[in-house]
Amino acid sequence: MTLRPRKIDRALQVIRMPSFEQVAADPVLYAHASRILHLESNPGNARALVQRHGAGDVGRDVWINPPPIPLTTDEMDALYELPYARVPHPRHRAAKIPAYEMIKFSVTILRGCFGGCSFCSITEHEGRVIQSRSEASILAEIERIRDQTPGFHGIISDIGGPTANMYRMACKSREIEAACRKPSCVFPDICDNLGTDHGPLVTLYRKARAIKGIKRVFVASGVRYDLAVRSPEWIRELAQHHTGGYLKIAPEHTEDGPLVHMMKPGIGAYDRFKELFDRYSQEAGKEQYLIPYFIAAHPGTTDEDMLNLALWLKRNGFRPDQVQAFLPAPMASATAMYHTGLNPLRSLKSRQRVHVVRGLAQRRLHKAFLRYHDPNNWPMLREALRRMGRADLIGGGKHQLVPSWQPAGTGAAPSGREGRGGRGGRLQPGVALTQHTGLPPMPHKQHRKR
């Protein structure tokens, strides 16, 4: 007689994670806990999680419920059709609120994201399954904005969501979707079971801009370009009707090492998207440009990776002004990489190490590579190039990264650090001070006698 283990309904199972004290003390257990969290993210098969905090009588278990079942289209419509005032709370009076100014004429058409980028936690907040509103509900909201929102002049600033072009996309099989344990539907390649039809989105765009009183409808949400290249028709619609000269897009890097740890597509997908975007822009007689965004110092990034990215930027004529360095954020798997030096989505038994950029000097160097054109960064870059055995990239040639000469009055501090407090060390009225624009001087610590 063969004995088989009794199959227990996953809805009745609970996973006990390493305790808080264990993950705080052991980086491997921290990575293991992060792995559990991300693998138990599908509402179709996720189990409840339990973690012990404290010991003895004061200890307690923290219970984490499985993710909720995604909202249906009718439920999404009901949620977004509540009688919102669409203006800030009266307590703010006439104050100008930047966050409100950015979104007051925008329309959310979907929730969720199946991209699974390691530096992002949208999936943990909104779910991996896309929840889309109906076409009628979206068009009705545009009409309400036209009729009710103060200051509206006929321009919808954005029609999108966490990602611009995942509207109505879903797994072709509900059974496969419910059983899937993958953290991403598009990495390392787009899943064969994923429906990628952009047709409903193209139809929605056309109906939105046909509404009386609507002059322009822009798309400002992030474009998932590896999906977009599967629909040249959507790219044509985007370039010819929904872009205002510049389109922000986020390849994040050019090198495979960082991109694998970011769970982002290779730079070839960006090149293909750019080719189509430029072609359709020219077809419409428009001069339009892509503005690529990149991340410096992400886990898995080496100095050589940043050098190659800088050379790509120069070769393609990009001079980034606003750049970002990786910062660990709650719940993101890249945060676990940063803290532990391990990839939580890979087998932890092999203890395969991830290169982590920690020191301030190296983080500044990676950021300086993005701003290779700023003379304040040239001394640091020249020193790094010599250390890397790439002194051949110092000079005035087109193939070289930084010149050998230094303009007078520059180079004393990396860009963004000169003269704390703004230009010339003076506080500028109306300018928010950050670590990048220059912080005011730190007060000297006074050691008072007690």
Image: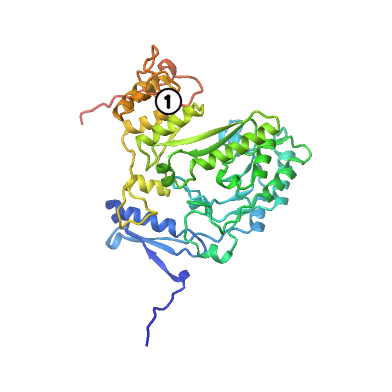
**Is residue 218 rendered to the left or right of residue 436?**
right
Describe the element under mark 1 as helix, strand or loop: loop
Most foreground residue, 38 or 404: 404
- Asked whether the viewer can see residue 290, the reply is yes
Q: Residue at x 39, y 78 (%)?
A: 5
Residue 185 x, y percent position in the rendering: 52, 54
Q: Position of residue 363 (x, y in %)?
A: 36, 33
Q: Which residue is painted at 56% across and 35% down in the image?
A: 248
Depth check, front residue: 1 or 72: 1
Question: Residue 444's spot in the image, x, y percent?
Answer: 29, 24
Amino acid type, label 1: Tyr
In this orientation, which residue lies closer to the viewer: 313 or 104?
Answer: 313
Seen in the picture, residue 58 relative to 240 is either above or below; the reply is below
Q: Is residue 257 left or right of residue 450?
A: right
In which image quadrant can residue 361 be found?
top left
Quick check: can you spot residue 224? no
Residue of label 1 = 372
Q: Which residue corresponds to the image point at 52% horizontal and 39% vertical from the top-left?
A: 250
- Which quadrant of the view contains residue 87? top right
Q: Which of 331 and 256 lies nearest the eye of the viewer?
A: 256
Q: Please tell me whether residue 255 is drawn above or below residue 51 in the rendered image.
A: above
Q: Residue furthest left?
A: 449
> Residue most toward the top?
408
In the figure, 220 relative to 31: above or below? above
Q: Quadrant of the C terminus?
A: top left
Q: Quadrant of residue 255?
A: top left
Rendered location of residue 345, percent (x, y) = 40, 54
* 431 sits left or right of 243 in the view: left
